[in-house]
Image (cartoon, rainbow, N blue to C red):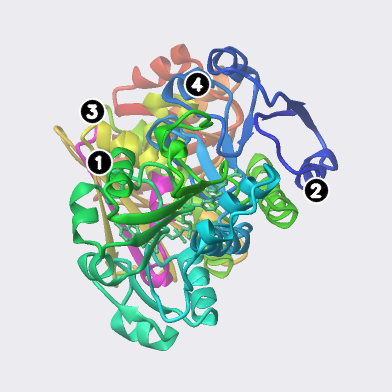
Amino acid sequence: MFHILIADPISDEGLDVLYKAKDVSITKETDLKSEELEKRIPEFDALLVRSQTKVTRNIIERAENLNIIGRAGVGVDNIDLDAATENGIIVVNAPNGNTNSAAEHTMAMMMTLSRKIPQAHSALKNRKWERSKYVGVEVKNKTLGIIGLGRIGTEVAYRAKGQRMNVIAYDPFLTEEKADKMGITYGEFEDVLSEADYISVHTPLMKETRHMIGADAFRQMKDGVHIVNCARGGIIEEDALYDAIVSGKVAGAAIDVLEEEPFQDHKLLELPQVVATPHLGASTVEAQENVAIDVCHDVLSHLNGDQVKNPVNLPSVPSDIFSQIEPYFNLAEKLGMFLIRLTDDVPEEVNIYYSGELSDVKIAPITRNAVKGLLERHLGSRVNDVNAQYLAAKKDITIHENRTSTTKGFTNLMTVEVKTKSGIRSVSGTLLNGLGARIVRVDDYSVDVMPVGHLVVIHHKDRPGVIGKMGSLLAEQHINIATMQVDRSDVGGNAIMILSIDKYPEQSELEALKELEEINDVTAVDL
Ligand SMILES: NC(=O)c1ccc[n+]([C@@H]2O[C@H](COP(=O)([O-])OP(=O)(O)OC[C@H]3O[C@@H](n4cnc5c(N)ncnc54)[C@H](O)[C@@H]3O)[C@@H](O)[C@H]2O)c1
Ligand SMILES: O=C(O)CC[C@@H](O)C(=O)O
């Protein structure tokens, strides 16, 4: 049974996806204070929020059973992503469902700002007929400067063109060619500031964008510029905006978001030139249904062990590529688990070699599984593909991926190699068409071992009778051998034996095997 906490109001259409699912229990607590959430969070496998609940490091670190945080919306600035990644918790969002609503809200705010509709409306409601006081300006032929031309910025650009505005945009990913195709002007940040009559920000709130519009940016703007922020509070520095409005530099501002929310009492709200809404950009029936449905599907997929569509702290893999590489995930993890059992010292460097068919597929997700396998021995089950790479880096283990053409006769071959202070150890595996995964090489020995169940890896001297002695000893301990693989370096030299047995051996049973004089070492590996 999976326990899911809904901590913010989320559309019932989305929640229906969860209500209809098997083995899911849903708790709706949309008024929890931060301290209460900290106390309750250990009960839950999944947490669903919108923008209101702040998912802090404290909450995440107490969330011992949490697998996934779902954000019904785009911005994830209310979730401590680093803490989630470090703790192996995947964060998913719903980036597409509210684009249209946010773009429409931006246009509504721009128009309302230009025509002073809220101010005139309030006056009239107070029975004041003040026609001369509320003279506006047209947007036609004015220049709209867009900062952040992503999903919403792009939709705003098209709508502004529909209003016959000129559009200039700055986005690190925007090229002149793309701007030409859209019929807008490509600009640097400073060009947008100096050329626009209206400036609308549409970036995420991140370290790099926090306060990107401050006193210096206002100085570069035209006198009488209009400002719109329907993205995130904090992109615009609020004190600087206040001063720019009071000084007359900025004619007016339309604000859907502020740095501290919920906001009721803010000095910007006292200014008659400011029109504001309480973070309503995504508040339409359609957007809320869309984001809730999207995020609930992803939460359910993840809990059921399937791929999610909109991961935030894990690169997303298109489904056709995913189906091509997914069969290798298990092989990669098993190779990592196998190899680390043979390695007593801490790995300092890991090299993963991909050959044959594997040399031209997307390998990063396969690597994550190999690293997960390598770390599980020491870090336990909390290692997963979300935090494997982070945890490796934290332990100063460097990971290198290599594509090679050496297939050694296999159509696909993957080798995991670790360097430790006592040397290099490696293991190779392949997926055999129709037969599944095989370990085909351990260091310099060739073998053919299914990476499942209880294995015993024995390094021994190549002498007559060793196999017999080993068999008799195991028989005395009532341990049945299912399969056996043997290889040697040269006649009478070193050799390896990998047994697959029917139960995990006791330490004393392994010690008994080590007593044989031909045996160099014995390692049990449970896969
Ligand atoms: N008011 C609301 O209710 C509401 C609703 C939806 C989204 N939002 C917010 O709107 C914003 C945009 O959402 P989106 O879905 O379009 O996101 P998006 O990721 O599609 O677009 C963001 C764009 O900003 C660009 N960008 C990043 N750093 C930049 C920088 N320093 N300068 C210029 N551009 C930069 C990115 O390249 C990207 O193209 C986000 O902050 C989101 O949280 C608000
Ligand atoms: O939850 C909301 O309504 C706000 C959503 C919006 O800010 C977003 O980033 O998607």
Q: Residue at x 49, y 65 (%)?
A: 136
**Label annotation for residue 345:** 3
Q: Residue at x 29, y 53 (%)?
A: 248
Which picture quadrant has residue 26? top right
Which of discs 4 and 3 lies nearer the camera? The answer is 4
Residue topped by disc 1: 494
Let me know if residue 95 appears in the view. Answer: yes
Asked if disc 1 and disc 3 are in contact, CB closer than 8 Å, the reply is no
View quadrant of ligand 1: bottom left
Which of discs 2 and 1 lies nearer the camera? The answer is 2
The N terminus appears in which quarter of the rendering?
top right
The picture places residue 241, in percent across and down from the top left corner, at 32, 46
Magenta segment includes 348 = yes
**Label annotation for residue 187:** none
CA–CA distance between discs 2 and 4?
28 Å
Which picture quadrant has residue 219? bottom left
Dot 2 or dot 4: first in sequence order is 2
Q: Residue at x 37, y 35 (%)?
A: 82
Residue topped by disc 4: 59
Instruction: Please determine whether, in this image, residue 423 is positioned above or below residue 136.
Output: above
Amino acid tagged 3? Asp
Amino acid tagged 1? Asn
CA–CA distance between discs 2 and 1?
65 Å
The picture places residue 422, in percent across and down from the top left corner, at 15, 33
Residue topped by disc 2: 13
The picture places residue 199, in percent across and down from the top left corner, at 37, 63
